[in-house]
Amino acid sequence: MMKILKLLNTILISVVITISVYLSVFDIINNNIYEILIKLFVIPIILLPNIIRKNGFKIYLSEEIIYTLFIFVSYFLGSIIDLYNKIYFYDTLMHFLSGVLTSILALDILKRANVIDKNKIYINVLFVFGITFMVAGLWEIFEFTTDNIFGKDAQKVLTTGVSDTMKDIISAFLGSLIIVVSYIYEKVNNMKLFVINFIKSIG
C-alpha cells in the first residue's frame, strides 16, 4: 500500500511539473514574466519535502502526500489552472483548508518534539493558533509584495480594500478552530477520535 501511495504521489508531482512547464512556454512566447514565475515557482514549492529531506530532516510519507495534495488543489488548480477566478468560493475554501492543515502540522510538530502530552492543553492550543496565524499572515505578505512588484491585485485591494485579506485570515482561523475544538474535546474526554488518532498515525 505504501509503495502505491508513494508512486501516486510521484505521478502527481510529475503531472504538476510537466503541465506547468508546458503552459509556461506560451507565457515565454508572450513575454508574460508574472505568469512565467507563477507557473515555474510551483516546481520548488511542490518539491520542498524532497529538498527538506535531503537536508537531513525526516518527513513521513503521509505528511508528504497531504502537502502534495494541498499544493495541487491550492497552487496548481487555483493559480495555474485559474480556479480562483473561475469558482468564486475557491479561494475561501483553500484558506479554510490551509487552517485545517496548518493546525494538524502544528500538532505534529508538538508530537515530534515529544511535548504534546506534556504540555497543558491551552499551551498546545495557543501554539496551534500561533502557527495558523503566522502562515496566514506570511501568505498575505507574500501576496501584497507580489502585487506591488508586478502591479497585480491578488488581494483585491482595488475592489475590496482589506476585506479580502481579512476574509482569508478568518477562513484559515475557522479551519484551525475546527481542529482545535476537536482536539480539546478528545483530550478533555480522554477519547481518541479523528484528530488525536490522525496525529499519532502520522509516521
Image (spheres, helix red, strand yellow):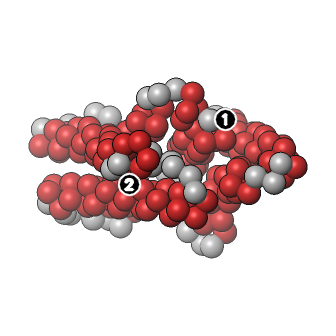
Using the numbered discs, state the Cα–Cα distance from disc 2 to disc 1 in whole angstroms: 22 Å
Determine the residue located farthest toward the left in the rendered image.
188
Please say whether residue 13 is visible from this viewpoint. Answer: yes
Q: Quadrant of the N terminus?
A: top right
Query: Where residue 156 sits: x, y (%)?
Result: 44, 45
Q: Which residue is mark 2?
A: 136
Q: In percent of the image, x 49 and y 56: which residue is there?
A: 143
- Asked whether 116 or 154 is in front, the reply is 154
Residue under the image location 44 percent in, 29 percent down: 89
Q: Residue at x 40, y 36 (%)?
A: 92
Q: Amino acid at mark 1?
A: Ile
Residue in view at x 48 percent, y 31 percent: 90
Asked if residue 92 is positioned above or below residue 40 in the image, the reply reads above
- Tell me the residue that label 1 is attached to: 81
Q: Is residue 197 visible?
A: no
Q: Position of residue 170 (x, y in %)?
A: 28, 44
**Side of 40 relative to 25 (left or right):** left
